[in-house]
Image (cartoon, rainbow, N blue to C red):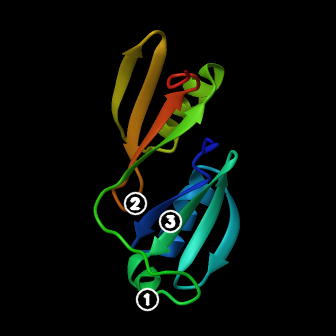
Amino acid sequence: MEIKKIKETCLYVKDLARSKSFYEGRLGFEVVGEVKDRHVFFRVGQSVLLCFISEASKQGGTLPPHFGSGQLHLAFEVTKEQYGEWKKKIQELEISIEQEYDWGGGFLSFYFRDPDKHLLEVVMEGMWER
């Protein structure tokens, strides 16, 4: 028995419009769900990025309450061929790249932040393959 993958991951944000502007407007992620003053969901490849207002999701309701705070981290995987294009796109959007890291074996990644200061990473496909 094996879990296939992480289907969705969640960031807790302060301003949904600002997050939507960043993830949809700047990075080009498709919005797949939205509830005013509560959440916005984005398609990211085969996964979904959930952005919740922490206080709203803390209340629970149909689903169990959940919430968080602080600067979280997640990584987006791209093909080796598209890595340079993504790096250029982030630079052209005038989003500061904090660091690029050489993981060895021909794998690179770079780090930048979203408007809530969550640490985002773009990593070359294949780095964690078994």
The x, y position of residue 62, in whole percent, is 59, 87
Q: CA distance from mark 2 to mark 3?
A: 7 Å
Picture quarter containing residue 25?
bottom right
Query: Which one is closest to the eye, mark 3 or mark 1?
Result: 1
Q: Callout 2: helix, strand or loop? A: loop
What residue is at 33 percent from the left and 56 percent from the top?
117
The x, y position of residue 119, in whole percent, is 36, 48
- In the image, residue 111 sits, relative to residue 26, either above or below, namely above
117 horizontally vs 41: left or right: left
Image quadrant occupied by the C terminus: top right
Q: CA distance from mark 1 to mark 2?
A: 24 Å
What residue is at 57 percent from the left and 49 percent from the top?
6
Q: CA distance from mark 3 to mark 1?
A: 21 Å
37 horizontally vs 30: left or right: left
Question: Which amino acid type corresponds to the residue marked 2 in the rendered image?
Answer: Pro
Dots 2, 3 in contact, CB < 8 A: yes
What residue is at 57 percent from the left and 66 percent from the top?
20
What number is the disc on residue 77? none
Dots 1, 2 in contact, CB < 8 A: no
What number is the disc on residue 19? 3
Dots 3, 1 in contact, CB < 8 A: no
Question: Which amino acid type corresponds to the residue marked 1 in the rendered image?
Answer: Gln
The x, y position of residue 11, in whole percent, is 44, 62
- In the image, residue 38 sits, relative to residue 61, either above or below, namely above
What number is the disc on residue 59? 1
Badge 1 local density, few (<14 within 10 Å), some, or many (20+)?
few
* Residue indicated by mark 2: 115
Closer-to-camera residue (90/107): 107
Badge 2 local density, few (<14 within 10 Å), some, or many (20+)?
some
Image quadrant occupied by the N terminus: top right
Q: Callout 3: helix, strand or loop? A: helix
Question: Which amino acid type corresponds to the residue marked 3 in the rendered image?
Answer: Ser
